[in-house]
Every structure is written in C-alpha cells, then in structure tokens.
Image (cartoon, rainbow, N blue to C red):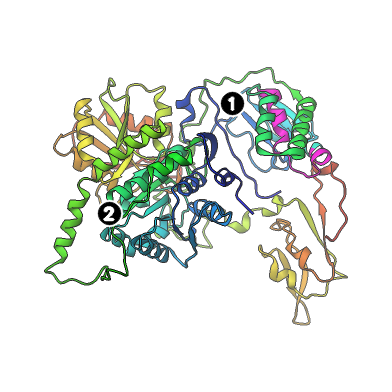
Amino acid sequence: MGSPTESYVRLSLNEDLVRSNEQVYAPHFVAILDPSLLGEVDVTAGIPEGGWLIVNTVMNQLEIQDIVKRKDLNIATIDATRIALDILGRNITNTIILGALVRVSHLFSIEALSDAIMTRFKGELAGKNIKSIQQAYDETCIYESGKDVDFLIHTKVPWQQVELGLPGYKEVDKAGVWYCDEEIIPVGSDQVNTGSWGEWEILWDKDTCTDCAQCWYICPDFAIIREKGDDGLWHMAGIDIFHCKSCQNCLNICPVNAISKRMKQGPASCAAPEETGGN
Amino acid sequence: MSVEPMKLFFKEIKEPIETAMIGNYAVAGGVTQTDPDVICAFPITPQTQSVEGLSDVVHQGRLKAAFVNVESELAAISYSTAAAAAGARAFTATASQGYLLMSEALPMAVGWRVPLTMMISARAFNAPNLSIWNSWEFVLTDYGWNCIVSENVQETYDAAILSVMISDKSLFPTMFVHDGFVISHSVQKLTLIPDKIVQKLTPKIGRHTINPKKPGTWGGIVTPSFFMEGRKNLDEAKEPVLDMMRETFKEFGKATGRQYDLIETYNLDNSSKTAFITMGSMCGNIISWMTKNKDVGLIKVRAYRPFPYEELQKIVQEHNIEKLIILEKSDSLNNLLPPFSTSIATALYPLGTLFRSFIVGLGGRDVTRDEFDVAKKKMGAVKDMNGPLYTYLGVRETKNKILGVDL
C-alpha cells in the first residue's frame, strides 16, 4: 500500500511540551495499519515498558509478541481491513484504527472523534467512517501485559539521533563519494525491498506475451526483467518482485493482457475478495 | 483536483478559525489573504506545497493573480522583481540550490527598493553530498533583504502577512524563513486571521514603479562617479527598517492578539546567568526542554535582518547575562564563526559577554535535549574567550565516538 511511512502526534495539556519540534523517539501508543510492516520495520522502537502496540491484523497477541520480540507491551488487535472492505468498500484503515486507539488510550472520546470526522468528511462518507470506527472500538481485542505506561519518564536513548555505528567524519570519503567497491554507505537504493510496499502481486503470462516491450519502457522502477536470448534478441523474462511496487502501469499498457494482478496474501488482506485478473 | 487544506481559503474567512496544517500550506493561505497580483516560483523541496497551494486558489478563482510558471529560480526572482517594479504585489518562494541560483538577481530587488516577499523553507545546499533536509542556507548571503525567521506553523503563517507589511513600509524586499521539513511539513495548530483584518493590515499603497508615462532606465550602468552614492543611499534607507518592523509587530499584535518582537526572551533572570541564543524551530525544542531546566534562559531572534544588535545589547545588559550559548545550523569552514554567530559576536563585542557557538542540526539532523544538556555543561566550564569559539555538536567522529561527547 505504498512506501512505509510513520507519523506522530504529541498531545499534552502543557503547551510548552507540545511546542517541541524534536522528533518523537519514545511513543506511548503505536498504531500499525499494515501488519506486513511488523517484521520489516522495527515498529516497537522506543516504546517504553507498558506502552501500547495497536495492530490491524487477524493474528493474536502471542504471534505478535513473537514477531516483535517484546513481552512488556500491551497489545490491541483489530481486523480493520475487513471492517474497511465491509463498510467503506475500500482497503483504507487509517480512520478505523483510531477506534482501537480510543478504546485503549482514553485520550479522547468516540464522540469527539466523530465530530472531527464530520468536519473532515461529508454525508454518507462521514457516516460510514463513524460506523466503522464504532465497530473497531467494539471489536478491538485487548491483551494487557499487566504494566502501565509512565508518561512522565523520558525514554529517548541519549544521542540516538546521531546513529552510532555509521562511519564518522574521520571515516567518510574525503569528497563524499560512494565508491561502488566499498561499503562506506552500505544501503544503495537497489538494496531496498521496494517490492514489499506494493498491495498487489503482478503476474506475467509467458504464453500470451508478444515481447513488444511496452511494459519495459513504461516501468518507472526498471522492474521488468528482459534477457538476451540465443537468437541475439531481447525477450521478456519476468517481473522483479524485489523492486516492483505494483503501480500497475505495465498491466494497463499491455496490449494483449499478458500481465495481471493478485492481492498479496498477507494476514490482514486474506479476508479480501479475490479480484479477477486484468483490469 | 484541489489540495484539501487549501479549501479553507476558497471562501472568505470571516472569523478567526482554529485549524491545523503544515507550514507550507499555512504560508500559501497567508499569502492568499494578502491578495498578491503575481506569483512566480520554481518548485524545490521542501518549499513546493506553498506554491502548489497558491496555484490551487488561483485555479479556483479565489485569487485573481497571475500565476506564472518559469524555467528556473533565476527566472522566478527576475520575473518577480520586475513585476514588483511594475507595481505588482509579488510573491516567490525557494530553498537551498534554488536560493543559490537566485543569487545573481537577489541584490537588485534591494537596489530597486521593491516590496517583494519570498518564503524560504531552509534546506542544506549540496556539498559534499546532496541533502534535501534542513540547514540554514539563507544566512550565507547578505544582499540587504529583510529577513524574519519563524519557530512554528503559526509564526510562519503570520510571517507571510507580516512580510508584506514590512516590505510595503520599508520598500525593501523581505524573506521569511521556516526550517525545511521540521516546520514546512509538520502539521501544527494555528489560528487564521479574518480576511477583513488582513486587508486592513496590508492595504495596497502607491509607490515608485516602472511607468510608461515617465520612462527611465532601471539598473543602468554608472561610472565610479556615482556607484558609491547609490550604495550609501541604500544603507541610509535601511537604518529605520528595524523601527518599522517593531511598529509592524505592534500593529499586527493589536489586530490579532499575537505579540511578536524583534527578539523574544524566556527565563533570562536565571541562576546561571546563561542563555541560549538561536532562531527557528529549535527554539520550541529548547522551551520544551526548559520545563525541566530552569537554570538557563533563551533568547530567540525573530528579526534576523536587519540584525537588532542594539536590542540584543540592551537585553544582555538588563538581565546581566554573562554567557551566551549560540546554536547555529550552518558552518563556515574557514576557522571563522558562521554568519549567525558572527552577527551576535559583533553585537556582544563592546559588552565582553562570554559566548561559544555550537554548530548543530546540519542536513536535517535532529537537535535534541542531548545537545542542549552538553552545550549547557560545556558553557559552565567556559571562563574566557580563549581557544576556538565554535564546535560541531552531535556529529560522529568515528563509528563509536561522538565529537566532544563522553558517552
């Protein structure tokens, strides 16, 4: 569903505390909209003991504890994807998961959230969002660790913004160059698994394909693989799933429907109705 | 398609509206309310949404302005300056390399005395590597523009309106700056000013313009017999600008209830007689950190150019400040203090106040309580002005060592 993003909000009655523009290093509540991020991003980074991890998933608490390797967190789960598909008709879960957040945090009420929804959305759409938030509130499964979070303790790791372990100023190249045969700055963009961002698996049918290469030209990520055959000509060879973000440009441009898509089989998306191939 | 947060500005704002948006859209809204005639800018991260938002209000018919697409920042500043010289209220915006590309034309906006306004989303310039994140590139050039720096989204929204007032009053171009990404892309609470009040604050008044009925050469060549007089003429015209800014802040405060000053101070009468001095988004971090560190104060510079050095001297003397900790998001590479610190050192010279400059937060590195703790501790040990006056803080020396910090 796009590249992994994180965003934070600070809430406090003390205006001076909210006035900080410092990054949030130790969130007390973390809501995960896509469970495939659990194993991929360190989603529990900085959460203090007794903090809350709220996940859109059909997994249970033990499975989540296993993946994030933390037992000192309170966990709440909600199958927001199913609610989204049922009520909104689209896999958009960002308002829905707030129902679970209200349930465990008591930071604000469902009524206040509904008011905010109604200023942002109009008519039927507002109603659907409020209905799905209420359903999420009711259906949230709560697993308490027996520990409460202490809002007064700062748990930022000193100097974590400086990221020790990466090369220092005495170790980087004198001209800022990243040489290909050295691993000074180790993560080049070809090493990033952008394929995991996509919502769809893109499928290629070898028998239908005519090797016209229109998909190869249109792909913004060079994720269409071509190989030189024994005949000395280039032939379509498949999809580079490590980099394909499933933008579906190739699927849309293919003149012979040799490219189709299938929703990825993730824990949350398993409830999604199977879409037919092609467009 | 329109940009959601800009919808607030599609119709007349009749009452103060409390809302939340990112710094760039807030600026786009503020500029909309000042009713510019010409908007001309070239997109560059992290400035982009400000111009995107303005294209939206022009497209919706809310703002009757010429929205001009150009091929570069040099074209944008040239076009905007000329439009302002022709009598238009003009706005442009940029950052980083775009600001550097503008350099050639930046002095002429000052020379022609045009009340142009420009937003800058402060971003590092590229050397030795490309960075799209926050540093203070705008402090590196000094062509005579007025410059105000904002801490948060509310301040940068207000600055969009204040800049028009200051430009119109002083007949010098004004840039207003917020830290790129930190403020340009952070959603924060702000209160919008009703249109009627903005209109009252920013009336369009007559001034010198290019006029076909009175033809003349603007920017024509002069011999050594004339150039220096032109420069001194500008210098003298700049003298009253600080007073004009002070008046403008007062007028704005009366109309909106939000009080600003050239320099703002927090907790200066503290036990250690020490204060941080900086500007921009870091001030918020320090104020937050100060809730638990009450033995140190903060001096926040809001008006960076012209530099209010007399104001600063007065503050330091009145509060018996003995030591100043300067935090600056730029460096000089020449064994000299970087520009912001240089300005402060100049003002402090007759007072003999002790200071050290800490270079922090380059290329978007966060500036946190760790930096403030160490800077405060290091300043505690300072007894004189011997030795190097600046140091980098929050930089890795080697893989496992932070420069000047014992872990």
What is the quadrant of residue A78 in the picture? top right
Q: Classify B297 as above or below B396.
A: above
Q: Residue at x 49, y 41 (%)?
A: A163
**Residue B160 on image: x %, y %:** 42, 46
The answer for how far apart the CA atoms under marks 1 and 2 are is: 47 Å
Q: Which amino acid, mark 1?
A: Pro
- Image mark 1: chain: A
- Residue A62 visible (yes or no): no
Q: Residue at x 73, y 36 (%)?
A: A126
**Residue B122 on image: x %, y %:** 41, 49
Q: Which amino acid, mark 2?
A: Asp
Residue beneath disc 2 = B142
In the rendered structure, the answer to whether residue B227 lies left or right of residue A153 reads left
Q: Classify B382 as above or below A88.
A: above
Q: Residue furthest left?
A: B225
In the rendered structure, the answer to whether residue B261 lies left or right of residue A39 reads left
- Image mark 2: chain: B
Crowding around mark 1 (Cα neighbors within 10 Å: few <14, some 14 to 19, many 20+) is many
Dominant SS type (magenta): helix
**Residue B25 on image: x %, y %:** 52, 46
Q: Which residues are magenta?
A: A84-105
In magenta segment, residue A93: yes
**Residue A175 on image: x %, y %:** 40, 60
Q: Quadrant of the C terminus of chain A?
A: bottom right
Residue beneath disc 1 = A48
